[in-house]
Image: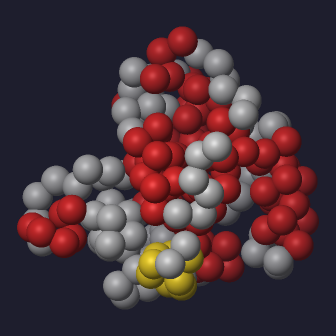
Amino acid sequence: MPDINTRAELRRHLQRWKGACAVCVGQGTKDGERHELWQCTRETSRDVKEIWKVFRGREGIKYDKGSACKKCGVPREMCIHWQEYGRGNCDFDSVMTQAFVGILYGFKGTTAVTSWRTRVYSRGLISYGEEETGEIALRGGNKMVDWLGKGHEWAGFQTHHLAEEVCILSRGVERRM
């Protein structure tokens, strides 16, 4: 059984999604393992890529100070870029945000994602319409996006809610892959 709620689990999920397009994987396309969301040329991913660009961009998620590398969004304790270099390339550049958005939309009708939407709706983080349709507004100033960037301790280290949610969603959809 894989580690649950640990840095090892998060690293395993990030490694899983590195170089993969969660939208294509969720839709069962054969080439989903050979490109990332930002590289996807499928018509079905066009709108998802725009959502991802907003979510990771200036108007999207803002991580609490010290909870993540500003470049990749990975908890600072796990990011080599943060710890050793302060500049350069991160091992998981954009993987966290691509996995999150890609899973939400690529695996949209699955039990894992609908259960996740119900859970965050019950916490008051998304609206009833978002919970029902799966069309979640991923812009800054939105309760959900603000909450995802909030720092907190999880699995014995300082991180943010997005890291935990990527684990929960990945854990749920990996049973389907």
Q: What is the image's colouring?
A: secondary structure
Q: Residue at x 76, y 75 (%)?
A: 125
**Residue 12, position in %: x, y?**
46, 46
Q: Looking at the picture, tell me which residue is in the foreground, 68 or 101.
A: 68
Query: Does the rendering let one see residue 153?
Result: yes
Does residue 87 lie above or below 168 as drawn?
below
State the image quarter where residue 154 is shown: bottom right
State the image quarter where residue 56 is shown: bottom left
Relative to residue 119, is residue 153 drawn left or right?
A: left
Q: Looking at the picture, tell me which residue is in the foreground, 37 or 166.
A: 166
Relative to residue 166, is residue 66 drawn left or right?
A: left
Q: Residue at x 44, y 81 (%)?
A: 158
Relative to residue 107, is residue 43 drawn left or right?
A: left
Q: Residue at x 50, y 22 (%)?
A: 32
**Residue 86, position in %: x, y?**
12, 71
**Residue 121, position in %: x, y?**
84, 69
Does residue 90 lie above or below 75 as drawn?
above
Q: Looking at the picture, tell me which residue is in the foreground, 4 or 52.
A: 4
